[in-house]
Amino acid sequence: MDLLRHLTFFVTVAEERHFGNAARRLEMAQPPLSQGVRRLEDRLGVRLFDRGPGGVALTSAGRDLLPRARALLEDAEALGRAARRQAEAAQVLRVGVVADLGPRVAARLAARAGRVAGRRAALTGGSTVALIDAVSTGTLDVAVVAHPAVLESARAGPVVALPTEVLLPAEHPAAGDGGPVALRALRDLDLATAPRSHAPAAHDLLLDTLETRGRPVRAAEADGPAAVLALVATGAGFALTPDPDLGTDGVARRAAAGAPVPFRVRIVHRDDTPAAVVDELATVLREAT
């Protein structure tokens, strides 16, 4: 017998206290409903209802078993929902991209990875810490994050060094001639960058690198590329960005003079992520170098 179906009969009759009302609620005829309840009683070896001309009443066994029947039905529904989510996830490649790369690059990464996987790609943006956590817990299949970073249980993929350019206030003297900008010429500006909590190791490495090259900086933390851009546009800071599209009125984009300061990213992924997806993401990133 279909136990879940017959438990649904039992619960519905118990709630309606009437076979006719329960049958209408279940959109079925009354005789099959009555027969189904009797079959369940035979299966369980107990009588669930006292039947009378005015309706039905639960027996003591029925009162005891009703909460258990409801719990079984609720668990079955939860199981079905979980299975549907798993089935939907199997049709989607879940890709995460750190926000620093910008929407155009992120969309290209997701689209190309999805094409290789033969699945629709769903894109998630976020911080390095959040994306690694999502890969580690299985809510993302693959992500492009800042390097270095603690990877938790995510698998490490290739590291790619992306070129950066300097964003500085358009009215700043260093922006005047349109040529490369020496970072030491920006000593009056803070470095506008994402909060250290977004990618602690990468954040510290950037500041250490600039200090080693003779440009100690103070970090002005901004929660996302738009906030970074706002700090630059208002004259409060400069930024190093790998996003080729980041800019607005009042902001100049210049190459950095001297040794480059790349933005390093790493591909992290789940154990079952196809190698072809990881390779394609690396290819897209290298095309930008």
Image (tube, rainbow, N blue to C red):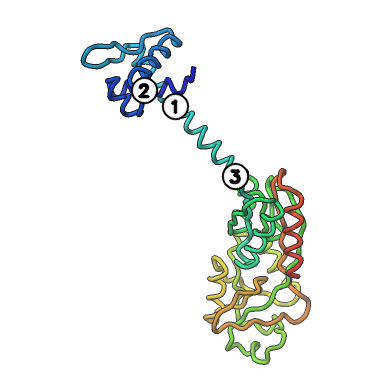
The kind of residue on which mark 1 rests is Leu
| Quadrant showing the C terminus | bottom right
**Residue ID at (72%, 54%):** 116
Mark 2, residue position: 11
Q: Mark 3: give few (<14), some (14-19) or many (20+) Cα within 10 Å.
A: some
Instruction: Tell me the element at label 2.
Output: helix
Mark 2 or 3, nearer chain start: 2
Mark 1 or 2, nearer chain start: 2
Label drawn at residue 73: 1
64 with respect to 238 (left or right)? left
Image location of residue 79, percent across then percent down: 52, 32
Image location of residue 209, percent across then percent down: 73, 70
Residue in front for this viewpoint, 31 or 67: 31
Marks 1/2: CA distance?
9 Å
The kind of residue on which mark 2 rests is Val
20 with respect to 92 (left or right)? left
Label drawn at residue 89: 3
